Image (cartoon, rainbow, N blue to C red):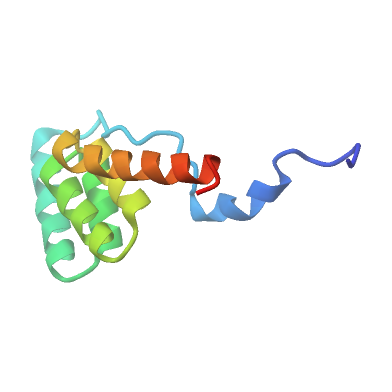
Amino acid sequence: MYLNANKNEPFDRFLHESLIKSSDLPSQVITSEQKAALNRKGNERFNEGDIETARRIFQTTGYSDGLTRVGDALKEKGKPVEALKMYWLAHNRRKSDPLVQELAILIRSIMTGM
């Protein structure tokens, strides 16, 4: 064991990727008109295939339908954990619960030695 080792050092490489966000709650400082305009822009970006920009917009506004569609796109791309986060933020239990169950089964199998 290294006495002066920084406990967070293994995670430092993720800081620039925003792996850990301070908040995923929708912004409370934008008006409903601004939210509507942003959601339209997010829908445009999503339809153009710019899923990441759409995700950022929908997270800012808290637009649950948009977050769910982003989750669906991420799941199709083989990113179930990221999809789960979008479903969770959208409060979409119908989509999040099956992924939670799949992850629980995976973790259980790892812990019991498969």
Front residue of 37 and 102: 102
Q: How many marks?
A: 0
Residue that lies at the very extreme toward the bottom in this rendered image: 48
Query: Is residue 22 depicted above or below 99 in this figure?
Result: above
Instruction: Say above or below: 51 vs 88.
Output: below
Where residue 41 sits, quadrant-wise, is bottom left
Q: Is residue 79 visible?
A: yes
Q: Quadrant of the N terminus?
A: top right
The residue that appears at 23% across and 57% down in the rendered structure is 54
- Report the side of 81 relative to 71 (left or right): right
- Residue at 32% from the left image edge and 53% from the top image edge: 80
Q: Nearer the viewer, residue 67 or 34?
A: 67
Instruction: Residue 91 in the image: state x and y as whole percent.
Output: 19, 33
Residue drawn at point x = 18 percent, y = 64 percent: 45
Q: Left of 110 or right of it: where is 57? A: left
Vertical position of residue 18 compared to residue 74: above or below: above
The answer to whether any part of residue 85 appears in the image is: no
Is 90 or 28 nearer to us in this picture?
90
Q: Position of residue 56 (x, y in %)?
A: 29, 51
Is residue 102 toward the left or the right of residue 110 in the image?
left
Q: Position of residue 100 (x, y in %)?
A: 31, 39
The picture places residue 106, in percent across and down from the top left corner, at 42, 46
Instruction: Relative to 67, say whether 104 is above or below.
Output: above
Residue at x-position 34% and y-position 36%: 24
Residue that protrudes farthest toward the right in the picture: 3
Quadrant of res 43: bottom left
